[in-house]
Image (spheres, helix red, strand yellow):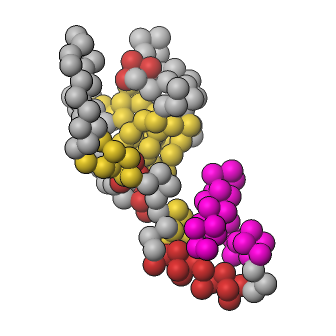
Amino acid sequence: MITDYTNKILGFYRNSKRMPSYAEIMKLVGFKSKNAVYKLVNKLIEEGIVRKDASGRLIPNKLLGEVPVLGLVEAGFPSVAEEDTLDTMNIDDYLVEDKNSTYMLEVKGDSMIEAGIHEGDLVIAQRKGEPKVGDIVIAEVDGGWTMKYFRKKPNGSPYLEPANKKYKPIYPKEDFRIAAVVKGVVRKY
């Protein structure tokens, strides 16, 4: 029975791009009281299906489940492929180091195309401490937001470098703030 409730709640998440409120869960699963929803949510938390973030909001724990890792594939010359299940991997765990500080953004534009990041891709960004030179970052520069390589001039002042020869580096004039470091890219074919 809990699987039916889980499917309805995660289905809502997939369609709405947010978790439902307790009142919405009550309607989704046909409960008559918020107390019943509270008990269901606690059961889902116990089972590791959802969790609460630092502000108490529900977030899904794992959406994709385990996927088998079958081996290696040549990206160069063809070789004999042997299918052998080496392990399983949870995509969420692979892509997300710290769920409380991670979010996704859809890419608009082509300034990072030579880094393999294309318009329409999703980037996984993590709020964390000081970025390293060479990291791809999400930054606010002089009132606007962008994604570029983080660089420093010899004098130590930061700037942002695109991964497309059509664009020039961005040198902050007034305001500069790194919001997150890009940890991964998701592309659907």
Taking the image as shown, residue 5 lies to the left or right of residue 51, namely right
Q: Is residue 188 visible?
A: yes
Work out whether 174 lies above or below 8: above
Q: Is residue 96 visible?
A: no
Most common secondary structure along the magenta stretch: helix
Q: Position of residue 102 (x, y in %)?
A: 44, 54
Taking the image as shown, residue 91 lies to the left or right of residue 103, namely left
Q: Position of residue 165 (x, y in %)?
A: 41, 11
> How many numbered marks does the figure carry?
0
Quarter-of-image position of residue 6: bottom right
Give the magenta-colored segment's residue range. Answer: 1-30
Q: Position of residue 63 (x, y in %)?
A: 50, 55
Work out whether 87 lies above or below 56: above
Q: Quadrant of the N terminus?
A: bottom right
> Viewer-proximal residue, 167 or 116?
116
Work out whether 186 lies above or below 28: above
Q: Residue at x 27, y 18 (%)?
A: 75
Q: Residue furthest bottom?
A: 35
Q: Residue at x 38, y 39 (%)?
A: 184
Q: Residue at x 75, y 80 (%)?
A: 31
**Does the magenta segment cover residue 123?**
no
